[in-house]
Image (cartoon, coloured by chain):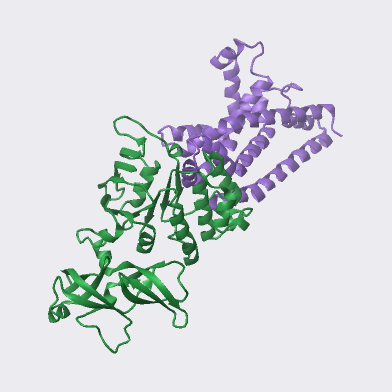
Amino acid sequence: MLKFDIQKSFINQHTGTSSELHFKAHIDLSGVCVIFGDSGAGKTTLLRCLIGLEECVGDIQFKQQVWKSKYQKQYVPTEKRRIGVVFQEPRLFPHLNVQQNLQLAVNKASSNTFNIEQLANKLGFSELLAHQTTQLSGGQKQRVAIARALLTDPQLLVMDEPLSSLDQGSKQLLLPFIKEISQQIPILYITHSEQELFYLSRNMLLVNDGQIEASGEPQQLFLNSDLSLIKLAHQGLILSVDVKSYDPDEALIKGCLDGQNLYISAETSPFSEQVQVKINSRDVIVALQPIEGSSLLNCLSAKIVEFAIDTQKAVVLTLQFDSQYLYAYITLRSFNKLQLAVGSQVFAHVKTMSIVN
Amino acid sequence: MLSDGDLQAIWLTLKLAGLTTLLLMIIAPPLAWWLARSQAKIRPLVESLVALPLILPPTVLGFYLLIAFSPNHFLGRWWLSFNEQSLAFSFTGLVIASIVYSLPFVVQPLQSAFVHLDKRYLEVSATLGYGKYERLYKIIFPMLLPSFIIAAALGFAHTIGEFGVVLMIGGNIPGETQVLSIQLFDHVESLQYDQAHQLSLMLLAFSVSLLVVIYGFLQKRQQRILNA
């Protein structure tokens, strides 16, 4: 459990105006909790306050430990909070080699849940232990930084956009690893990538304009039209598809979405039994009957549960399958011509979709 | 070859420079850290005082120290209250003067390293569990080791070359205050040019090789670390 109610005010040096951040939340920590929001929303400041690297006013409590208290003048400094931190950039010590960097963390760990060899193997840098950190690539450095944070034997792992500057290969190695580690240690994870959010987490904090706007399941929050998130959500949603089979000749995954068949293009066979696909709202064609004799592969039966007309006179339909949802953008003209309404049964044809993990 | 007097002067000089450097390496790091980080209003004043020996004629510094060491003034009186010998014309007096005189040479390389040190390394150290002071001597100081060596080397070399201050407060007592530069001056005064050549050449070779190591190796190494 992590509970905080903190405030921090900034004075803009140029304009002289002051702005105030106020974060308040109560999080059940299990697995990954993603802190999601636009850049400049205050995500990193929130995290730095929680770690104790930034001054703020208020209360922070982790499990039974009071890290900061406004009235009781209690304060636990960063080094005593036992938080493993992975920053956006690796921040390895340049005068030490990889092994020595990791050893600094081990020296301070209260117990050895992890050891250097095992993590180096798992993260694929065993042959780099004797190397100087300046010789490593960005991806290699960040893997070492993640290992270093874990070797402190933390009670909470905090990651600030750890994958944002990495290549696709490193991301593919690290995302499943982070998910696996979250079974052992709760993780607070900042990102503005929907892919990472949906892959990692069942729990998110939405940060907007210096406040926690909402918290809960990502699937739910992306459907809530009262939130600032809705603009982004309307672009397209991420859905989970169960993999049934893979046909290498046609390079297609045959999958199942809420009981309906779906084909997804994929160069290689998927690694897991479930894939996450992003369907762009503008790539969805809505019809009253299944379209015959076309190149469209995917036709899904759905029900309209909500619609909204935006400023450009386009209509965003919220389509419900069984448990999952999809947004579709259509013109007002089509909406009127098809006489659509809440409750209408329609067929959603999906032109393209992309696998996000 | 070197005379006994020369050897004695060399030994005394090394002893003075060694002891001064040792004491400076205790005093200078906290002072340099404060100068690099503090926002206090008196910081520029303190910084100026530390830098003063860089431009002040050594004889001026020596003159004021001589007066301060005299029994008529507080420092000298206080010293004589538990010592028989006066600070003036003593080895201890030379050590105190050398500390003042060489302080900027030790403080400035350290201060520059501390200023250029990325604050983020301090943050990482804290998240790894290292406390306020522990993170300095276990992580940050080793990281800045080249700068510490440069500081110590410059302090040592500068003390070896000290002349004006020693002349004012040390006099010329063999084995007590007769250091290398004074001995050299004596040789020249008495027209012993061969001996003067020997000592001069030694000092020249020492200084050149030291500076080559500092600028050719240590400083580059430190920059590589700081810019990583």
- To which quarter of the image does residue B78 belong? top right
Q: Position of residue B101 (x, y in %)?
A: 60, 31
Q: Position of residue B165 (x, y in %)?
A: 64, 28
Residue extending farthest to the bottom is A293
Q: Position of residue A105 (x, y in %)?
A: 54, 44
Instruction: Give me the residue at 46% from left, 76% from top.
Output: A267
Q: Colour of chain B?
A: purple
Nearer-the-camera pick, A105 or B34: A105
Which chain appears green? Answer: A
Instruction: Give me the residue at 51% from left, 60% from top.
Output: A139
Nearer-the-camera pick, B28 or A313: A313
Q: Position of residue B180 (x, y in %)?
A: 74, 31
Residue extending farthest to the right is B1
Instruction: Give me the residue at 34% from left, 52% from top.
Output: A43
| Mark count | 0
Residue A153 placement, left or right of A194? right
Nearer-the-camera pick, A104 or B92: A104
Say above or below: B46 vs A357.
above
Say above or below: A312 vs A130.
below
Instruction: Give me the residue at 84% from left, 36% from top.
Output: B194
